[in-house]
Structure formats: C-alpha cells, structure tokens
Image: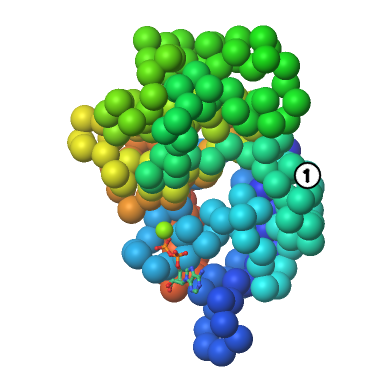
Amino acid sequence: MQQVIELEGVVKRYDSTGAPVLGPLTLTLAQGEALAVTGPSGSGKSTLLNLVAGLDKPTDGTVIVAGRRIDRLSEHALAKFRREHIGIAFQFFNLLDDLTVADNIQLPARLTGTGRREAAARAGELMEMLGIQKHARVHPGRLSGGERQRVAVARALVNRPALLLADEPTGALDTASGHDVRDLLTDLHRAGQTIVLVTHDLPLAEACASRTVRLVDGHVVLDSYARTAR
Ligand SMILES: Nc1ncnc2c1ncn2[C@@H]1O[C@H](COP(=O)(O)OP(=O)(O)O)[C@@H](O)[C@H]1O
Ligand SMILES: [Mg+2]
C-alpha cells in the first residue's frame, strides 16, 4: 500500500539542552488511513503535525510526505509543497474575514494557478458537499464556529491534497458543532481521504479515526487500529 507519511528517526528540539520535545519517532501512515494523534497537553502533538505539514523542520531524521522528502526543502519549496499536497484545518479556523466564504475556499486553488472558473467550480462542489453553499457570499465572521470550521475544511480540500491535517478542529466549538465536524471528518475518511487529526477529544478520535497514536513526552506509547474496518 502506498505510504502518505514516512517518518524515520525524527527528533525535534526547540533548544539544544534537555530532552527533545518529540522523538526519536518512526511512523508510517498509509493512503486512506485516518490517524488520530492524542496525548496530554505539551506531549508534542502539534509539533508532530507541524513537521508533517512542513511548517517546521526536524532537528534530526527524515520526513517524507506524499513521496517527497521535505525536511531539507527551502521555505519557498515547502510553501509550494504545502499548497499542492497538504490541507490544514486549525482550531481557530484561520479564515480571512475580508473575503467571502467562496473566496476563502478558492484562494489556495488560485495560488496554485488554477483558473478562476475552475477554482469557483471546485469551491462550489465542496460547499455543496459540506452543506455551506448558502453562505457562499457571506463573510466568515458572520458564521457560527461549526460553519467556519466547515469552510476551513473546504479550503483545506480545494487542491485535492494527499493529506488532510487537522489540529484540534473541535477545540473551539460547542458540542453540537463539534459533532458536525466529527461527522464531516468521518465522511471524508469513508470517501478515502487520508487524515491526521490531532485531538485530546477522545470521542472524536474514536468516531473518526481508523488508527490512534498516543503521545506522552514526545514518545508513542500506544499505536492501535480500530477494530471495525470502515
Ligand atoms: N516554538 C516553540 N518553542 C519552544 N518550545 C516549544 C515550541 N512549540 C512547542 N514547544 C514545546 O514543545 C512541547 C510540545 O508542544 P506541542 O507540540 O505544542 O504539544 P501539544 O500540541 O501536544 O500540546 C511543549 O513542552 C511546548 O512547550
Ligand atoms: Mg497542540
């Protein structure tokens, strides 16, 4: 099976003294897996996600994502790699409030050179799929948290990324909106999307993920597969 993530001996230190905040870590994720990364606050979950996203570089080790070694790339090459191969949804959505919902979703497509019409068509398809088409011309500031997270996920998917990353996507949401996002991620996984979800929300992990990795002090203490195949 094709691997979407291959981490080999990955270590991250933020300073040269003391223990690393992550690793050494060796981990692979196959296409179609939905991995939940859980663990206490400060255990290295976001650090792991940022390394996989190419938002940060390891102190040591190899990071291969979508078949490409990314730990040695320049910032410019990383930015291009991220736009083309990775979609990220953050806890606080990181949407642009001066743009409409439709324009927020289209933006990463436009940045990779997709034409206006094609980007609009893809955004329309995603808004329909995620049930937010009625908000196309609205600015995200007017939407509820759950709706904003749907917009953020749509934006993350616009370039058909090999990998969808989500860092605490329900962390800023009320329970009902959290359930919406849970259902959305579950549907995406069923449709074959490879996902890494960082969360301390265990019911979310259980509902969406085919595999759970638990980090403690930067080490994997548990790596388990869901019993039921999805
Ligand atoms: N940019 C940074 N500079 C210094 N230390 C950091 C930085 N980012 C995270 N850390 C530290 O690394 C450890 C892991 O952090 P993080 O990956 O954010 O954990 P989690 O997402 O599991 O809460 C924590 O001790 C945190 O304080
Ligand atoms: Mg975190």
- Image side of residue 146 versus residue 189, left or right: left
Relative to residue 143, is residue 127 depicted above or below?
above
Q: From this viewpoint, is residue 185 visible?
A: no
Q: From this viewpoint, is residue 92 visible?
A: yes
Q: Residue at x 67, y 58 (%)?
A: 7
Q: Residue at x 66, y 26 (%)?
A: 109
Graded by Cα atoms within 10 Å as few (under 14), some (14 to 19) or many (20 or more), the crowding at tag 1 reads few
- Image side of residue 215 versus residue 121, left or right: left
Residue 224 coordinates in the image, percent (x, y)? 46, 51
Classify residue 23 by image quadrant. Answer: bottom right
Residue 207 coordinates in the image, percent (x, y)? 35, 35
Colouring: rainbow
Kindly give the residue lying farthest to the front in the view shown. Answer: 98
According to the picture, the residue beneath numbered tag 1 turns out to be 67
Residue 204 coordinates in the image, percent (x, y)? 33, 40
Classify residue 62 by image quadrant. Answer: bottom right
Kindly give the residue lying farthest to the bottom in the view shown. Answer: 17
Note whether ligand 1 is within 8 Å of mark 1. Answer: no
Q: Residue at x 60, y 66 (%)?
A: 25
Q: Which SS class for mark 1?
A: loop
Relative to residue 92, is residue 23 depicted above or below?
below
Residue type of the residue flagged with mark 1 = Gly
Q: Residue at x 67, y 10 (%)?
A: 117
Nearer to me, 1 or 103: 103
Q: Quadrant of the N terminus?
A: top right
